[in-house]
Structures are given as structure tokens and as C-alpha cells.
Amino acid sequence: MRAGGGAASRALALALLLHRCCLLLGPLGLRPAAAQDGNGCGHTLLAPHSGTLSSKNYPGTYPNHTMCRWRLQAPLGTSLLLAFGDVDLEPSEHCAHSSLLLSDPQAGTAYGPYCRNSVPSAPLLVTNSSSVTVLFNSTSHRSGRGLLLSYATSQHPDLVSCLVRGTHYTQEHISVYCPAGCKDIHGDIWGNPSQGYRDTSVLCKAAVHAGVIADELGGQVTLSREKGITLYESAFANGLHSKRGSLSEKRLVFHKACDDVLEVAAFNASSWWHEVDVLGQVRAWVAERAALGTAGHSWAAEPSAETAWLELDLGTRRNVTGIITKGSSEQLRDYYVTSYRVSSSRDGKNWKPYRGSASQEDKVFEGNADSHGEVSNAFIPPIVARYVRVTPQRWHQRVALKVALVGCPLARVRAPRPYVPSVPREVPVPTSRLSTHTPIPGIALDPEKAGSTLLVMLLIGGFVLLCSVLLLLAFLCHRKRKSAAELNCGITKGYPKLESSQVCSLQSLQPPSLASFPTAPAPGDLSRTHSPEYAEPDLVQVSPSSQTGPSTFKPLLDEGYTLPLVLSHYDVPGKHHEYAEPLPPEPEYATPFSEPEPPGTRRSPCGIAGPPGCPPVRYRTPAPRPGEERTGSPCPEGSRGDGPLAHVYHEAL
């Protein structure tokens, strides 16, 4: 009995010692990162760096007389941030019926209690502690959605709640940190990764659907608000089904790198199905039909095969970030895979199953729900391999599959060269002064004199540039004056200059050929005609040393006469002569002025012998030129009227 009692006492002492050790090691952070207990806990995902928790039945009414306690623990050296998504507890005095209480057991601080009439003052609570206990308690109540809370470490100050929507932002570019566990929180999303999402979608849930972050980890999200579109198509991706949405003012476009469709070099499969129709024709569902862009039917395995798989050879190692699957693509043959696993290999022999980022088990991906729709799944972290194998787990009627891989080429990282310290060379110190001059390879400038030297160089360069500009201006002015001195002496045409002199020469002008007009003869005498006499230009003999004579006539057009160059308005008329234009070749008549005669004294212009119908003649017409025949006229020459009716023509000046 004594031996038994001693053993029992030793066991009790050991248990007390272990309990004390647990109490001592708990504050040191050696306990689990997070834990929960109670009957009022709802959706909960507690990751090392972030997480989400909610009350039971959220967003429905939480049950009566329930309690839940969550213990949150951050890594050493960091503190916790708490984002309140929703706190809707039935109000009561001092929140006695239903309450939320936050406490720090190490520092002895507490936040709350909170309920509907006593909500947190800010959506984000910054604590200075690495461990926080969240206590939710409810008694008898009638209404209330309950509690939704998210947390992250102090390394992510831009933490947001799972209920934040795109309409809560006004800036064009958005960068936030989404916590883990937002995938199963109630909230709608409209759209797909290729088109974008309606701005009324919950932001973090849409990020999981687009494959930007993994729900079990959370992460940083970068997106932009762009112009909305008319219709948002629904899609199934990463375990979430989005809705079909209508027109919106803005849409959410997530920025994701390494998201291109990879080219597959070859397909291989465990087996393929040879279909024989009612007419006896054979159609092969070979592995090459598994390409997503292939028209018609897909790859299908033999019905008798116990384990079927499809292998894709990328030709070289690639960075694979996602996969897209599709069924048989035929309405009459509704074949598709509902779930599958993925493994990878670098040599095609040793295969490594893909596992989630926060799990040690092989990850099972959700497949298709019909034979014609496309389903996307993201690899976070990505796969780096050349060979990728898809192994179906469950299927509908028959294993049939079309596959496409998403990713980018593998970036080659060059290994840095090892650092080799350079050994300083020994410079011999001369013991005696050398007689020969050693050339200096370079010029060393004193840092204190470098500024003044640069200033002198700038001044010299500026002086040289200024002198060049002045010389150019002087040359242009000299050339301009020289061209002005060589101008000809005329307005419209100039005389050609002599080679040995710059003095203008005046050559003989030929009198223009003008029409001759008769002078005013005596009354009744029409045979005398006189041609008008014009002043002839003076003929001046011009020598190289003599001056040119003035002239009032414009030279001929073929003598090189040009308009004088007018340098300014003060040069008009200028130093050159302006010549008078010669008379035009056509005669110009002056209209006579006479008083009307009485009707009784008016005589016939044709005379007695004039024929009837002859027009009256009032003017003396000029005589025809010599040698020119007179045209016929109905009136005789002698019946042109009497002398008193004739008038003298005025010659043009």
C-alpha cells in the first residue's frame, strides 16, 4: 500500500509540474497560433498571419445561450490588427444579453463589450499585443446577425474585412490586404477573371475567384476600377461560382502576373477510347484531342481502365500558375470529370503530387459540372516543372477531358559570382630622384578647385560661341549690302550689267508699234490723215566709265529689266528711275459735248443722195492705214455730214 501511495503521489507531482510548465511556456508563444472552443462558433479559419471568424448561423440570427472563445496568436515580434466586418448583437444595457469582448491576457487590457448600441468607433482596431482573446456570449434575444471579425499581423496595415465591396472605393487603383477565410463568407460576385467583376462584388471573395490569392492564406491584392461593361458572364473557378450581372458604372480588374496559356509540346495518356457507332465506324478519342482549343470531341479513357491519367509535356521547364479543364464538348455524350489531382515531374519519371500551401495532404481540385463549360483552378504556390499529370478522381459517365495550362516561362536567375578580394599591389618608393620625366597617365583635380576650373571652362566656351555668332551676323550683313548694290535700275525689268562695271547701261529702245490716228482735218476734207507723234527716247552712248542717261520710257521686256529690291518703305521710289508706260495700241476716243438741235433744223446725215437706212454719223473716224483697203459701207463717202458737225479727237496723253 505504501508503494502504491508513493507512486500515486509521484504521478500527481509530475502532473502538477507539467501544468506549471504549460502555464510558463504559454506566454512565451509556444502554444498554438490560434484555437477556438464553445458551442456558438461559426465559420472559422485561423492562419498564422491572418484569419476570419464568425458566430454561428452568420449572417442569420445567432442562437440563444451560446458562447465561443477564439485565441489569436501572432508571430513573435509582431502585433495584431482586428477588422470588424459586422457586429450586430441585440442591444441591452451594458450589452448584458449579447456581447463581444476582446482582451489581452498578457498585458491585462480589454476592449469592449460591444453590441448593437455600442459598436467599435473604427473599423480597424490596432493592438500592441501579439495575443488576443475574442469572447462572444449570447443569452435570450430576438434578432441579430451576430459577429464577423478578421485579423492580420502588424505587417499588413491595409487589412480589410471580407465584406468590403468595390463601391466603397473612389480611387482608380486599389491595393489592400485580404485575410484568409473570405471564400465561404456570404457575399455575391458578378463576372469572371477575363472580363472583370462588377463593382458591387465583394472584393476579397472576387480575388479568390480570380485566382489572385489562396483562401487558406490570404494576401495582397492589387486591382483597378475601370469602365463598366454591358453584361458580366458567370464562371466557375477555384471552388466559387459567380453570377451573371448587368451593366455597371465601374468594373474591378485584378492584376495578375504570369497568366498566359502555355503551349503543350506533346500529350500522353494511360489509354484512350475507340468508339464504334451503329454504322460500324470507329472514332478514336486519342490523347491529342485533349487540347482545349481542339474542335470536336475530347480525350476519353478506356472504360475498363481502373486508373486513368492524362500527361502534358511542355517541352521545357515552365512556371505553371493554373489549369483550365473542360468535358467532352458534345451534347449527346455528356462526359466530364468532377474532381482530379495534379502531379508534376522534371524528368517524366519521378512524380510529385501537388499539395496546398497550408496542408500536408494532396490537394483535390473541383472539376466540371457539365460537358461544355470551362473551370479554372489556380496553383498557389505555382508548379515549376516540364511534365504535368492530371489524375481524375470522380467523373460523370466516362473519363473525358480537355486541358490547358496557364503560366509563363521560367525566369533564369544567374548565380552571382563569388567575391574575390583584390590584393593591393605594392608600389615601389624611389630612393633617389629620377633624372628622366615619367608621363602622367591622367590629371588629378583638387576637389576644392574643381568648381573654379569648371566655371573657367564654361566662360571660355560661352565666349567662343558669342564670337561665332557675331562673325556670322557680320557676314550676313555684308552679303546683304553687296546684293543691294548690284540691283538693276528699274521697276519691272532691269538692264544687263557690264562685267567690268556695276553701273547700269541704257540701251536703245525700239519704239513700239502703235496704231496711227488722223488729225482733225478741215471741214469737208477727209483725205488728210496724220499719225500721232510720240516722243522718242534719247539715245545715249554708254561707256563703262560714263553714267547712264535718264529715260522716261520703260525698257523692253526682253532686256533683263527686273523690279528693284525694296529694302524698306523709305526706299520707295528708291534710287532707281520709274518709267512711264507707253500708250496702248488701241485708240481711245473722247465723248463730245454738244447741245441737242431742234427737230426742225436737224439734217439728214447721209445727204440728198444717201441711201435710206444709213446710220447717222456724228464723229470723224480715223483714216485707214496706208495699204489697207476700206471695207464696204452702205453710206457713200461723200455723205458723212457737213463740217460743222465734225469734232476733233483728243489723242491719249
Image: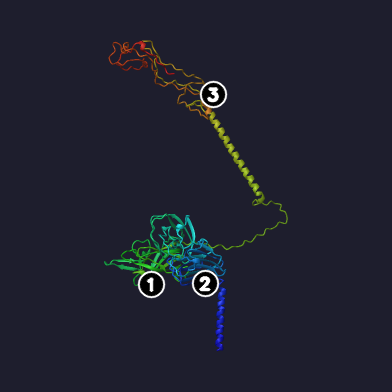
Residue at the spot of label 1: 307
Q: Looking at the picture, tell me which residue is in the foreground, 516 or 66.
A: 66
Tell me where residue 545 sits by quadrant: top right
Q: Are marks 1 and 3 in contact (CB under 8 Å)?
A: no
Q: Nearer the observer, disc 2 or disc 1?
A: 2
Residue at the spot of label 2: 32
Q: Residue furthest bottom?
A: 1
Looking at numbered disc 3 in the image, what kind of residue is underneath it? Pro
Q: CA distance from mark 2 to mark 1?
A: 40 Å
Q: Residue 101 location in percent, x, y?
A: 51, 67
Q: Is residue 384 visible?
A: no
Q: Nearer the observer, disc 2 or disc 3?
A: 2
Q: Residue 444 location in percent, x, y?
A: 65, 51
Residue at the spot of label 3: 544
SS at badge 1: loop
Q: Residue 225 location in percent, x, y?
A: 45, 56
The crowding category of the residue bearing disc 2, from other C-alpha atoms within 10 Å (few below 14, some 14 to 19, many at least 20), is few
Q: Give the mark nearest the N terminus, 1 or 3.
A: 1
Looking at numbered disc 2 in the image, what kind of residue is underneath it? Pro
Q: Is residue 649 visible?
A: yes
Q: CA distance from mark 1 to mark 3?
A: 119 Å
Q: CA distance from mark 2 to mark 3?
A: 120 Å
SS at badge 2: loop
Q: Looking at the picture, tell me which residue is in the foreground, 612 or 284.
A: 612
Tell me where residue 640 sits by quadrant: top left
Q: Is residue 282 left or right of 115 when viewed as pictured?
A: left
Q: Is residue 337 left or right of 573 when viewed as pictured?
A: left
SS at badge 3: loop
